[in-house]
Amino acid sequence: MGGKVDFLAKKYGPLKDKTLHNALAHRIGKEFPRIGGPRILKLCAQMVMEVVAGHLRPREHLRHGQALWLGYGINDPPARGKRTRDCDLVPLVLDLSADEDIDLILKRAGADQRLLQKALRLCAQAHQQGALLSNCDLAMLLNTGDERISSLLCAHERRTGTVVPRRATLHDMGSGLTHKRIICLKRYAEGKETLEIARETYHSLEAVDRYLGQYDRVRHCRLQGLGAEETAYTLAISRSLVKEYLAIDEELKGA
């Protein structure tokens, strides 16, 4: 004889299955019937839940002056044909307004100085949370043009000999390519070791070695009497990149 049926559990137990997780699994199975069985459907639903949870922030978790924004994952560099929708997007909490911004206003600081301080803070906060902001991200957040942002940050990098951790520099996108110059100057003008350079410029050891090696190869070609066009063909890199390294070499000769 079978065991005694628990009619109470039979009637009320199914109510525990009324969850968003199960609803997602059911919808995925309905829309994509060949994706797999119940175990795969539950796993897919769980991954969707994790993405949604990562992109939401309860109001009590945000302070006055903060905003939620999506940045590009540090370890997900761009590639040919790769769109933003194909990238790892990381939810960030950024301080759009802080006491230091008010202090600069009270000190009668200029508009460019105030804008630069905000941009530097946002870039640092994004990097600390595992993501990078583009110049266009900063332009939208700060209600200005991306060219103005790029100009201010590039001038700051050149003036201070530092790299601002943003997508233009760490992912080689846009106009913020002064990190190559800074890396080469730190090595050949300041005599710093690769590990120290990597730490100061937010780059990996491999990236620093790659930039230094590329500079060395371009410089060798120049010493052999090759022009920019010939160097680009020989090293299989763009002519604009060769010119960038040649300009760095000229600067180092006078350093």
Image: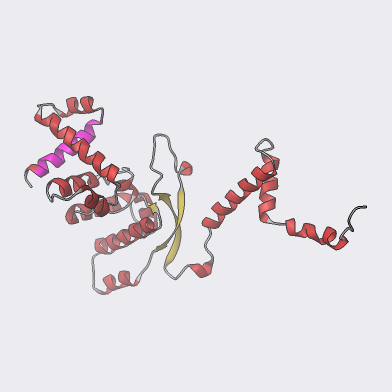
For the point 69% across and 37% down, which residue is it?
33
Classify 121 as above or below 37: below
For the point 81% across and 61% down, which residue is it?
12
For the point 58% across and 49% down, which residue is it?
47
Q: Is residue 157 magenta?
A: no
Residue 79, horizontal then vertical, whole percent: 39, 37
Among all residues in the image, which is located at the extreme front?
A: 1
Classify 24 as above or below 16: above
Could one spot residue 212 in this view of the protein? yes
Magenta stretch: dominant SS? Answer: helix
Could one spot residue 175 in this view of the protein? no
Classify 137 as above or below 243: below
* Viewer-side residue, 125 vs 16: 16
Among all residues in the image, which is located at the extreme right?
A: 1
* Viewer-side residue, 209 vs 178: 209
Q: Is residue 3 left or right of residue 203?
A: right
Q: Is residue 9 left or right of residue 189?
A: right
Residue 125, horizontal then vertical, whole percent: 36, 60
* Viewer-side residue, 69 vs 34: 34
Residue 135, horizontal then vertical, whole percent: 34, 50
Q: Which residues are magenta?
A: 237-252
